[in-house]
Image: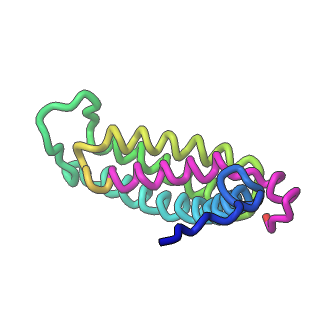
């Protein structure tokens, strides 16, 4: 029985190669557009969530005993409303390609992640979903470098 010997690796394959970096760059560039859309949609949902919390103080109920970050539900409503409005504005800035929106997006996604962590006892499933989305937004915005993409012939 003969064993097939692996062919020589081309210098343009594998981690650290220009092709691999270009693939990662394309994923992050597409992810940046998706991050802008996620910030817009998440912001609108946070505005709706905040409006309900402000209007009806008994909509959300703490699922487990006392909680260290226990706020009145209308306070959580205001927090989500403000974060939602800011996220919508930043998401629109990302989709327009504004340079400031990248760093502002990382900041608002970080604040949203912290707020949703603290909101876990009120809406556990929704908070976990929003935390995962915020992590993706932070990763996408932190890994995409538009100048490097243009130097490598990227579209963005």
Find the magenta span and give its range.
Answer: 127-155
Front one among 49 and 4: 4
Q: Quadrant of residue 23?
A: bottom right
Q: Residue furthest bottom?
A: 1
> Was residue 151 drawn as part of the magenta stretch in this picture?
yes
Q: Main secondary structure of the magenta part?
A: helix
Colouring mode (rainbow / by chain / secondary structure / one colour): rainbow
Q: Position of residue 43 (x, y in %)?
A: 49, 57
Q: Quadrant of residue 62?
A: top left
Front one among 46 and 152: 152
Front one among 26 and 74: 26
Q: Quadrant of residue 121?
A: top left
Q: Position of residue 77 (x, y in %)?
A: 36, 47
User: In the figure, is residue 35 to the left or right of 102?
Assistant: left
**Which quadrant: the C terminus?**
bottom right
Front one among 103 and 88: 103
Q: Residue at x 65, y 48 (%)?
A: 143
Q: Residue furthest top?
A: 68
User: In the figure, is residue 141 to the left or right of 129?
Assistant: right
Q: Position of residue 103 (x, y in %)?
A: 67, 43
Q: Residue furthest left?
A: 65
Q: Residue at x 57, y 49 (%)?
A: 139
Q: Residue at x 61, y 58 (%)?
A: 91
Q: Residue at x 33, y 51 (%)?
A: 128
> Was residue 147 drawn as part of the magenta stretch in this picture?
yes
Q: How many labels were placed on the picture?
A: 0
């Amino acid at each position: 029985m003969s064993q097939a010997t692996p062919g020589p690796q081309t210098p343009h394959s594998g981690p650290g190669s220009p092709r691999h970096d270009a693939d990662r760059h394309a994923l992050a560039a597409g992810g940046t557009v998706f991050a802008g859309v996620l910030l817009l949609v998440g912001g609108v949902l946070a505005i709706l969530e905040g409006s309900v919390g402000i209007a009806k103080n008994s909509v959300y109920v703490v699922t487990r005993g006392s909680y260290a970050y226990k706020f009145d539900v209308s306070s959580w409503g205001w927090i989500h409303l403000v974060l939602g409005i800011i996220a919508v504005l930043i998401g629109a800035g990302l989709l327009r390609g504004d340079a400031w929106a990248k760093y502002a997006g990382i900041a608002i996604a970080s604040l949203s992640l912290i707020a949703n962590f603290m909101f876990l006892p009120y809406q556990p499933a929704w908070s976990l979903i929003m935390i995962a989305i915020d992590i993706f937004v932070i990763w996408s915005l932190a890994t995409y470098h538009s100048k490097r993409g243009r130097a490598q012939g990227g579209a963005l």
